[in-house]
Amino acid sequence: MTQSEYAVIADYINDLQQGDLDTDVASYMLFQHTIDDIFETVKEQSSYKSKFAMISDEKQKEAFDKYAITDDEENLFKKHLREGANEVYKRLAHLGRSMPVKFIFDEGVAINEFEAWDAAKAYAVGEFMEYTSTHLLYVCAIATTAGDTPASAPTKWTAQAYTATDEVYIKYTDGLYYKVIVNTTAGQSPTTTAASFEIRADEIDTVGKVTILIENLKAFDVNAYDLLKNQIFQLYQKYVLKEWFKLVGMGNEFTLTMAEINELLSDLRMSTFRRITPMYRTSRTL
């Protein structure tokens, strides 16, 4: 594959997942983490930390909610996550020289993903599907039982219509991404009304996620991709927890978390140096 082909992010990710990545050309790596997933993990970790930090003090047990992150702290969580994600990105920014946009925090366009209607599936509210007998698009309005269709259970489905000015993107059942370029009426799809949709295979869903795009250098060991992604995920958590422990006065946990962050940053730096062939300084002596 050529670098221009890899400029389409979907192609790069597909090759990466299929194990068919051409490492002889420069390309891109996409690291995305869902903010809700990070929040749930942070809440769980803070609750355990708080529980065991207070186990010897009966009075403090009564104040458990004060020390554990809950849904009430979501806005504070997002503030510290954004700050921490920026710090992580700074450590990777030198690898993203050719990307016009390298760091995205909960911005951009949401993509509605449609799947072919499955007669055996019970759909949850908000799920999208293409009703295969008509190729019309629907969103579930009331939870369904297996076999419910827009014809047999019309109150459970709402035909999906789009306005082009809303910058709408969809992932259709053919696996391609589309932008709505002409207002659609109820249920119109790329199959029924192709002129209303424009193929945009390079779009990625960045709403509700932390996204980092970096250049995949030639000869980079792509086996390190999952390692890098996991290290980034851990750093997001630790940065939030560090600020939380400082805020609630858990000094020991703050110090421990700072040490964990420094260790993870060191590991992250080493992971970015992973190459298929070893690198040596020109002045190195054996």
Image (cartoon, rainbow, N blue to C red):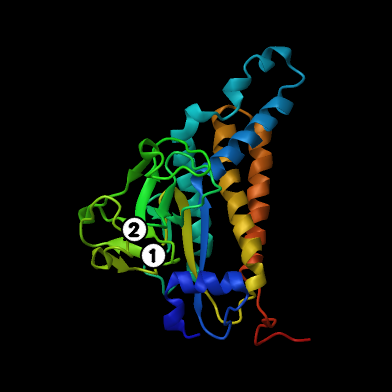
Count up the numbered dots.
2
User: Residue at the spot x=36%, y=59% of the render?
Assistant: 135
What label sits on residue 169 in the rendered view? 2
Mark 2–mark 1 Cα distance, whole angstroms, equals 7 Å
* Residue furthest top as drawn: 59
Amino acid under disc 1: Tyr
Q: Are marks 2 and 1 in contact (CB under 8 Å)?
A: yes
**Image-quadrant location for residue 176:** bottom left
In-image side of 275 versus 199 (left or right) = right
Q: Is residue 108 visible?
A: no
Residue sitting nearer the eye, 221 or 171: 171
Q: Position of residue 205 (x, y in %)?
A: 42, 57
Q: Residues within 10 Å of mark 1 (few under 14, many from 20)?
A: many
Q: Position of residue 221 (x, y in %)?
A: 65, 75
User: Residue at the spot x=40%, y=39% of the render?
Assistant: 153
Q: Secondary structure at mark 2?
A: strand
Residue highlighted by disc 1: 177
In-image side of 252 versus 133 (left or right) = right
Q: Quadrant of the C terminus?
A: bottom right
Amino acid under disc 2: Tyr
